[in-house]
Structure formats: C-alpha cells, structure tokens
Amino acid sequence: MNLGRFPRLRFAHLPTPLEPLLNLTTELGGPNIYIKRDDQTGLATGGNKTRKLEFLMADAVENGADTVITQGATQSNHCRQTAAIAAKLGMKCEVLLENRTGSRDPDFTRSGNVFLDRIFGARIRHYRGGTDMDAAMAEVAGEIRGDGGTPYVIPGGGSNPTGALGYVNCAMELLGQAGEQGLRIDHVVHATGSAGTQAGLVTGLEGASSGVPVLGIGVNVPKEVQEERVHGLACRTADMLDTGIEIERARVAANCGYVGDGYGVPTDGMIEAVTLLSRLEGILLDPVYTGKGMAGLIDLVRNGHFARDENVVFIHTGGSAGLFGYRGAFADAMSCDPREADP
Ligand SMILES: *Cc1c(COP(=O)(O)O)cnc(C)c1O
C-alpha cells in the first residue's frame, strides 16, 4: 500500500512504542497483553487524531485554507488536537462542541479538553445535545466565507477516507514493529467511535494480508450500526488507496456491550479500568473511550474470550486530558471527592 502519493504533514512522534503490559497480564492471568502507545503521538497530550490530522491538515493547506472548522462532544480530544495543530500552522480554528451528556458540571463544560482548546486559541461555540453538527459546521463555514476567509471543514473525529489514511499507516507501523520484536499478533483491540481508526486499521491490516483481526469496543451506537459505519468507511478508504482489495464485511467486528448509559456517561467498568491501569502500569486511560475500551478487554479476558497464550495488542488512542472533565465520577473509587477543597 503506497501512502506516498497523498499529501501529508509530519508532526506526529512516530513510531509510537509497542510494549508489553506485564503487570496487567499477570493480574488477569493471561493472555499476553501489549499496548501501542498512540496516546504518545506528541501533539498536545497526544492521541489518535494526530495521525489523521497529518493527512487532513495537509489537504487543508493544499486547499489554501486559513481556517479549520471541526466539531465534537464537549470533551472532544479530536477538537483539542485540531486546535493545537491549527495554532502551529498559523490557521484559525473554529471548534463546535455538542453537549451530548447534558452535564452542567463546570469541570466537564470548562476544564479538561475545553480548557486546552482555549489555551490553543480556538474559537469555541457550544451546542445542545442532538444538534445537527454537520449543518452547524456548514453554517460557520458560510460565515467565514462571507468574511472573506477560506474555511476547511474536518468531519467529527477526522473520520473520512483522508483521515483514515493515518490508521492505514498505523497498521503498517504495527506490523513492522511486531516483525522486529518477533511478536505474533493474534488480536488488536481498541475503542471505536467515529470509525476512522478502525476503518484505517482494518484497511491496512487487510491490505497487507496480515490476517490480524481487529475488535472495536464501541462507545456510543449499537453493534450493527457501528460495524456498518466502519465497514463503509473502510471500503471508501480502500477505494481511495486503489488497492483493488475488497474489505469483507465479516472482517469488521465491534462489541458495543460496554457503552453503559450512553456516550460519555461513566460506567463502573470504565472507573475500574482507569484505576487498574494507573495503579498497575502507571498509564493514564480516558473516561470516554479508552476507559470503556479497556473495560471491554478486561471483561472479555475474564470471560475466557482469548486463549491464555494469545497475544493481544490494545491500541491506546489517548484522551487522558478528558479525566479533568470527569473528576466527580472518580469520587467513589477514591477515598475522597477529588473536587473537594482542602480544609
Ligand atoms: C476519537 C477517539 C477514539 C475513537 O476513534 P475513532 O476514529 O473516532 O473511532 C478513541 N479514543 C480516543 C481517546 C479518542 O479521542
């Protein structure tokens, strides 16, 4: 697969490390769990959107944009990474935030990623949950054109074929590292949302005929909907790459049994996964994606889904800045409410 013909800006710190999680593996009694540290992509506390933005921002520059517009949930990691790279490239950034949980906790609405969006100088607009965010972005784009600017709209999560190229590249990087380490990868597991990450991984792993299966742990919609989304985007990504490879529907698997009450709403499994990884491995997960993704992986391990001698790679897609938007959710797991003032 040749990614070389697509415009790309290089700002991610790559390759990200691929390491064993020895303490977690011991705690759970196998399989062998590895982690790929895409939380360490280097841009503004890192995360998976950085890989996508290398291709998306290159396209924005090629199109002569002076302003990027994007959208996400209030604590969007994607918006934060977009705001950071826009700052570096000297572009204006319009961030449209949808309050999908309806929370009015000031930690949630102002701290974490929202605070970082502001530090990077993005213009923030808030919307109620359920707003048609694509229509809202089109409206902002019209405003900017009216003012003589040249906007470039990046879809939520950076999930279109251009963004997914970042995860085709990740798939190739992962296979290269596994080869160097003499590691046979039996499963790749990660949190899936707007679908670009899984679509890119599946396209890359299928394109390389690796046979490595990917399991996305869903964070919002039901399994069938998520799988269709990922499959559709993987097919469009494969078309854009001109691989001639057909992505079979059966190669796309999601488990959406760990969403709980909804997108961005904490679950007990998420709290357990975040505290377990922190205390066993010194690694921060996030409350919306990787916390639920890892909760799914842990539960599947406990239920004997993987053979003890299999090797499972969890892709850490980032997001720990979001923890600061969710301090209250951790009150029960700690001996105090982390929001309480000192006496
Ligand atoms: C966006 C995001 C995901 C999901 O990736 P998609 O490409 O949107 O499916 C997973 N983890 C984190 C931390 C994210 O910010």
Image (tube, grey):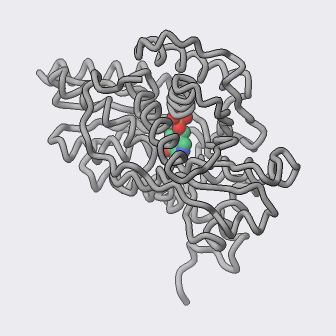
* The image quarter in which residue 60 lies: top left
Q: Which residue is at a point 49% across and 9% down the rendered structure image? A: 244
The C terminus: image quadrant: bottom right
* Residue sitting at the far right: 303
Q: Which residue is at a point 45% across and 28% down the rendered structure image? A: 164
Q: Which residue is at a point 46% across and 11% down the rendered structure image? A: 239
Q: Is residue 288 visible?
A: no
Residue 316 in the image: state x and y as whole percent. 55, 51
The residue nearer to you, when weighing 321 against 111, is 321
Please state if 283 lies on the left or on the right of 25 as rendered.
left
The residue nearer to you, when weighing 101 against 194, is 194
Q: Establish if 143 lies above or below 88.
A: above
Please state if 232 lies on the left or on the right of 15 as rendered.
right
Residue 266 in the image: state x and y as whole percent. 68, 52
The residue nearer to you, when weighing 343 against 112, is 112
Q: Establish if 157 lies above or below 183.
A: above
* Residue sitting at the far bottom: 343
Q: Which residue is at a point 21% across and 46% down the rendered structure image? A: 87
Q: Disc count in the image? A: 0
The residue nearer to you, when weighing 306 against 91, is 306
* The image quarter in which residue 54 lies: top left
The N terminus: image quadrant: top left
Residue 264 in the image: state x and y as whole percent. 61, 45
Q: Is residue 216 visible?
A: yes
Residue 186 in the image: state x and y as whole percent. 69, 42
